[in-house]
Image (tube, rainbow, N blue to C red):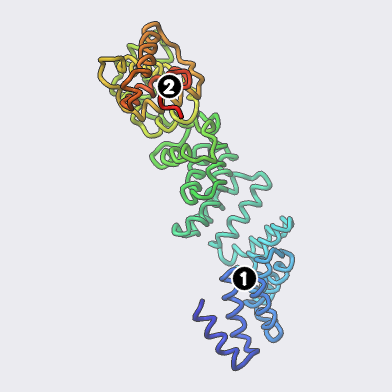
């Protein structure tokens, strides 16, 4: 662009009204996001080349970028009139007509463009949006799919809204899993655009089934890490994803079917339990939102109990501080609803009593034990939160 501008200005220095050089400057300004400057150059060219369809198209594009769809429409239509096989001019006229709310005319303009050039992505997408507006979600789907095929995979930001619109259309057409997969692709294409993650999160609320596979799982884990997404919207979907593992689903079903035998059931499925506790999606859910599943509630009740009993004085140190902290967050979020037995109450009292000892005051506290205590009650109610009077200012 720099070289083009330099050459054009060199020509204009000798011939100030040279239309080709003015046209080049207008195109450079358009590409640099300066449509008002582009308009000034193109208007000077129009004085001698008003019947040039490409000039009319460029005038339309400059007006479009300034936010004047009515003026843009006049120039796009003029370009198509001057050159009837100018597919892009018909297509951009359709875009302006849709922006102006003239939907029937927009559909005709899109159809004219697509008859000439069936792979015009913005026309395919625009026509699909008109179908969505009419409630024809199933008919819109193949047009969004065609628009995606016509948009290179290297243009991820441009593909993101196409995936999002395709996902929404599929969902409204009753294709739930395919719709969610498409919305996840939108998030993957443009993770920095907050609208797509929030759209997917809203659609996930209360869904008992989600797409299988690592790609959707990765997007779901990423959603849990976003401050602009309410993790409670994701909880049911996360449970559904976890239960896609037949071993996990079987364990949770057995727990829910026979709560009194929960301890024995968990012990018998030790390998499955360990794998679940190490699952990145499970950890993300555990730390972020109340878990809406009876089987998991019973499982975590037993996990919490085993962590507490292992943390008693003289017992081996509790495993995995990260897990203990995530479980503490879960218990805080669910307001400590898990049941306790007498053995746990005794062990918890002994654990909390140890927080006031000299070794804790000296900075030798076992943070695993602190996290385990936080699985049962808020830490501000324990000695771990009390300041040392001797160290007070």
x%, y% of residue 155?
48, 59
Q: Is residue 294 left or right of residue 11?
A: left
Local secondary structure at mark 1: loop
Q: How many marks?
A: 2
Quarter-wise, where is residue 37 in the image? bottom right
Determine whether 204 is above or below 163 in the image: above
The quarter holding residue 322 reads: top left
Q: Is tag 2's residue or tag 1's residue first in the polypeptide sequence?
A: 1
Horizontal side of residue 183 vs 363, given as left or right? right
Question: Residue 309: x percent and y percent?
Answer: 32, 14
At 34% from the left edge and 18% from the top edge, which residue is drawn?
Answer: 357
Q: Residue at x 48, y 42 (%)?
A: 181
The front one of 379 and 273 is: 379
Under circle 2, the secondary element is: loop
Q: Which residue is mark 1?
A: 34
Q: Inspect this view and state whether residue 352 appears.
A: yes
In the rendered view, would you say 338 is above or below 147?
above
Along the horizontal axis of the image, is 165 left or right of 298?
A: right
Of 116 and 227, the residue lying toward us: 227
Q: Residue at x 38, y 14 (%)?
A: 353
Q: Mark 2 highlights which residue?
A: 374
Q: Position of residue 305 (x, y in %)?
A: 36, 15
What is the x, y in percent for residue 349?
39, 11
The furthest residue to the bottom:
14
Residue 243 visible within the image: no
Disc number lying in front (2 or 1) = 2
Tell me the quarter of the picture where residue 299 sits: top left
């Amino acid at each position: 662009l720099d070289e083009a501008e330099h050459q054009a200005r060199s020509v204009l220095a000798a011939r100030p009204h040279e239309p080709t050089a003015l046209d080049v400057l207008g195109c450079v300004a358009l590409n640099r996001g300066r449509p008002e400057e582009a308009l000034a150059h193109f208007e000077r060219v129009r004085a001698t080349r008003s019947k040039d369809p490409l000039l009319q198209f460029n005038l339309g594009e400059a007006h479009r970028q300034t936010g004047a769809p009515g003026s843009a429409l006049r120039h796009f239509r003029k370009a198509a009139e001057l050159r009837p096989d100018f597919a892009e001019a018909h297509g951009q006229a359709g875009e302006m007509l849709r922006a102006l709310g003239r939907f029937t005319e927009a559909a005709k303009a899109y159809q004219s463009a697509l008859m000439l050039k069936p792979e015009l992505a913005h026309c395919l997408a625009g026509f699909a949006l008109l179908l969505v507006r009419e409630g024809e979600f199933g008919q819109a789907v193949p047009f969004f799919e065609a628009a995606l095929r016509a948009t290179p995979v290297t243009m991820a930001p441009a593909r993101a809204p196409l995936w999002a619109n395709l996902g929404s259309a599929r969902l409204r057409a009753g294709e739930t899993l395919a719709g969610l997969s498409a919305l996840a692709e939108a998030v993957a294409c443009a993770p920095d655009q907050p609208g797509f993650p929030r759209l997917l999160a809203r659609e996930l609320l209360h869904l008992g089934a989600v797409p299988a596979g690592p790609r959707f799982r990765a997007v779901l884990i990423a959603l849990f890490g976003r401050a602009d997404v309410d993790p409670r919207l994701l909880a049911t979907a996360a449970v559904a994803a976890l239960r896609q593992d037949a071993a996990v689903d079987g364990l949770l079903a057995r727990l829910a079917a026979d709560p009194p035998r929960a301890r024995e059931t968990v012990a018998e499925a030790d390998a499955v339990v360990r794998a679940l506790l190490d699952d990145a999606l499970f950890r993300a859910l555990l730390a972020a939102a109340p878990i809406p599943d009876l089987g998991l509630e019973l499982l975590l009740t037993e996990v919490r109990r085993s962590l507490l009993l292992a943390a008693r004085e003289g017992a081996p140190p509790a495993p995995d501080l990260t897990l203990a902290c995530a479980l503490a967050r879960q218990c805080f979020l669910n307001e400590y609803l898990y049941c306790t037995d007498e053995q746990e109450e005794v062990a918890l009292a002994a654990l909390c009593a140890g927080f006031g000892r000299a070794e804790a005051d000296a900075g030798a506290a076992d943070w695993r034990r602190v996290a385990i205590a936080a699985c049962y009650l808020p830490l501000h109610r324990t000695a771990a939160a009390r300041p040392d009077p001797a160290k007070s200012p």
